Image: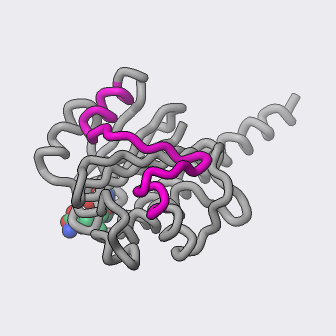
């Protein structure tokens, strides 16, 4: 599985907001969902998106969206405003799970399950050197960034990964990672086809 975790410092954990922007920048969560789960006319079935919301009134709240299971979700912001509000009211949506796990609990679980864990940071190791595996978790900061003490915790279990010197939006980082991994997997497939054709 390819998994993304957006650490949201301010995202509301109650449905008392009008726009996602007003809900402690839940618009960043929406944009990150879009880039994680959706391709043109299809879901990414091998991707799980997580966010840990740390805004008022009842943090932390962990929302997990499974690309393989998600149904009845369009790609526009208005639809996700409704979905996120309903989830925060305690209602169910197919493909979405909610619990009270903290960032630390999720990381410990993923580490025990054999995941390679990466904290996105422009000063990390270049994505060009990323070794692709079946179990990868990428942790991205929101518009403020990952708090230092949380990044230090992540680095007990994983490494910093850089997309270059430019600072990108959280959702852009997810898009770039998906693109890079898609490209490499597709090159691998093409090489295998060519090798098989030689016999
Ligand atoms: C909009 S940026 C956060 C900006 C924040 N002021 C900072 O300096 O960290 C959102 C997140 O994207 C990730 N990010 C942005 N640019 C990156 C890059 N070039 N390489 C790796 N991660 C990056 C980081 O995890 C960052 O916390």
Identify the residue at image location x=35%, y=37%.
117
> What is the image's colouring?
one colour
Quadrant where ligand 1 appears? bottom left
Q: Is residue 174 left or right of residue 142?
A: right
Q: Quadrant of the N terminus?
A: top right
Query: Does the image show residue 95?
Result: yes
Q: Is residue 92 magenta?
A: yes
Identify the residue at image location x=30%, y=62%.
11
Residue that protrudes farthest toward the left in the picture = 149
Q: Is residue 41 magenta?
A: no
Identify the residue at image location x=57%, y=51%.
93
Q: Nearer the viewer, residue 48 or 18?
A: 18
Q: Nearer the viewer, residue 58 or 125?
A: 58
Identify the residue at image location x=64%, y=44%.
69
- Compared with residue 61, is residue 172 higher up or lower down, i.e. above or below? below
Magenta highlight range: 84-111
**Residue 178 at x, y percent in the picture:** 53, 54
Quarter occupied by residue 185: top right
Q: Is residue 27 left or right of residue 39?
A: left
Q: How many marks?
A: 0
Query: Does the image show residue 167?
Result: no
**Residue 199 at x, y percent in the picture:** 88, 28
**Residue 74 at x, y percent in the picture:** 64, 67
- Compared with residue 83, is residue 183 higher up or lower down, i.e. above or below? above
Q: Nearer the viewer, residue 81 or 161?
A: 81
């Amino acid at each position: 599985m390819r998994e993304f975790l957006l650490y949201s410092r301010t995202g509301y954990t109650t449905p008392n907001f009008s726009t996602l922007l007003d809900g402690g920048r839940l618009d960043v969560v929406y944009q990150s969902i879009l880039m994680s789960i959706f391709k043109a006319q299809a879901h990414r079935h091998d991707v799980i998106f997580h966010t840990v919301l740390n805004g008022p009134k009842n943090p932390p709240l962990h929302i997990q969206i499974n690309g393989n299971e998600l149904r009845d979700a369009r790609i526009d912001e208005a639809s996700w405003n409704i979905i996120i509000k309903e989830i925060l009211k305690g209602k169910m949506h197919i493909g979405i799970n909610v619990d009270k796990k903290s960032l630390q609990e999720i990381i410990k679980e993923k580490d025990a399950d054999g995941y390679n864990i990466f904290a996105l940071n422009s000063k990390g190791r270049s994505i060009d050197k990323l070794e692709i595996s079946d179990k990868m978790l990428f942790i991205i900061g929101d518009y403020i960034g990952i708090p230092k003490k949380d990044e230090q915790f992540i680095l007990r279990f994983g490494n910093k990964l850089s997309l270059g010197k430019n600072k990108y939006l959280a959702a852009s980082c997810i898009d770039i990672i998906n693109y890079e991994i898609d490209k490499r997997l597709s090159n691998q497939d093409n090489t295998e086809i060519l090798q098989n054709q030689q016999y």
